[in-house]
């Protein structure tokens, strides 16, 4: 039995994923990421000042994650639905309509989690410093 030890101070990857699914800042794990459902991301963390936008067009990666996660759910469910006798008798356009009614809300539901995952995994791979918050007190 090998006991491989982590030498870096990096937190475990699963912690980063768990934090992302809570829609929390990848740095302090307290500040919210989402300003408004489904995909309006705050400019930075209200607690620690970490910028949530590393560069212009940053969340194109989040869109790709949304697409991938949606397909991960839609494809197996579609294949399982082929076994349902009630769906087999329906015309193709009706089945297509049912799939759109299923896939669009699913993508909207997965969107904030995908964006948060994109941010957290990027921060886990290559952390960046929070910006200094200027407080007048
Ligand atoms: Zn924070």
Image (cartoon, rainbow, N blue to C red):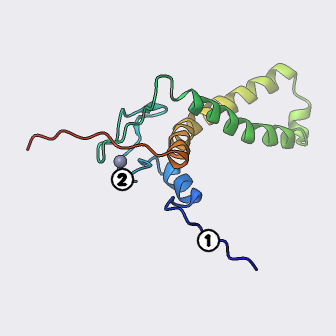
Could you tell me residue 117's position as x and y percent? 55, 43
**Is 45 displayed left or right of 53 in the figure?**
left
Residue at 73% over, 36% down: 71
Could you tell me residue 98's position as x and y percent? 74, 29
Neighbour class for label 1 at 10 Å: few (<14), some, many (≥20)? few
Q: Which residue, as the protein is rendered here, is positioned at the far top?
A: 93
Question: Which is nearer the eye, 80 or 54?
Answer: 54
Q: Quadrant of the N terminus?
A: bottom right
**Is 38 displayed left or right of 61 in the figure?**
left
Secondary structure, mark 1, is loop
Q: Quadrant of residue 72?
A: top right
**Is 69 displayed left or right of 129 in the figure?**
right
Whether residue 12 is situated above or below residue 113 in the rendered picture: below
Between disc 2 and disc 1, whose residue precedes?
1
Q: Which mark is residue 73?
A: none
Whether residue 115 is situated above or below residue 6 in the rendered picture: above
Mark 2 vs ligand 1: CB under 8 Å?
Answer: yes
Q: Which residue, as the protein is rendered here, is positioned at the far left?
A: 137
**Is 82 displayed left or right of 118 in the figure?**
right
Mark 1 vs ligand 1: CB under 8 Å?
Answer: no
Residue at 51% over, 58% down: 10
Q: Which mark is residue 5?
A: 1
Could you tell me residue 15's position as x and y percent? 53, 59
Could you tell me residue 64's position as x and y percent? 64, 31
Residue at 57% over, 39% down: 114
Q: Which mark is residue 30?
A: 2
Whether residue 137 is situated above or below residue 88 in the rendered picture: below
Q: Which residue, as the protein is rendered here, is positioned at the far front?
A: 7
């Amino acid at each position: 039995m090998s006991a491989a030890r982590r030498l870096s101070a990096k937190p475990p990857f699963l912690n980063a994923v768990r934090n992302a699914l809570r829609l929390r800042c990848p740095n302090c794990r307290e500040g919210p990421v989402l300003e408004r459902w489904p995909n309006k991301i705050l400019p930075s963390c209200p607690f620690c000042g970490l910028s949530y936008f590393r560069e212009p067009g940053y969340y194109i990666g989040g869109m790709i994650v949304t697409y991938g996660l949606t397909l991960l759910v839609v494809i197996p469910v579609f294949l399982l639905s082929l076994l349902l006798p009630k769906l087999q008798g329906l015309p193709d356009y009706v089945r297509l309509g049912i799939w759109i009614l299923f896939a669009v809300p699913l993508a909207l539901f997965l969107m904030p989690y995908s964006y948060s995952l994109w941010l957290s995994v990027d921060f886990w791979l290559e952390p960046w410093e929070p910006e200094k918050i200027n407080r007048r007190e």
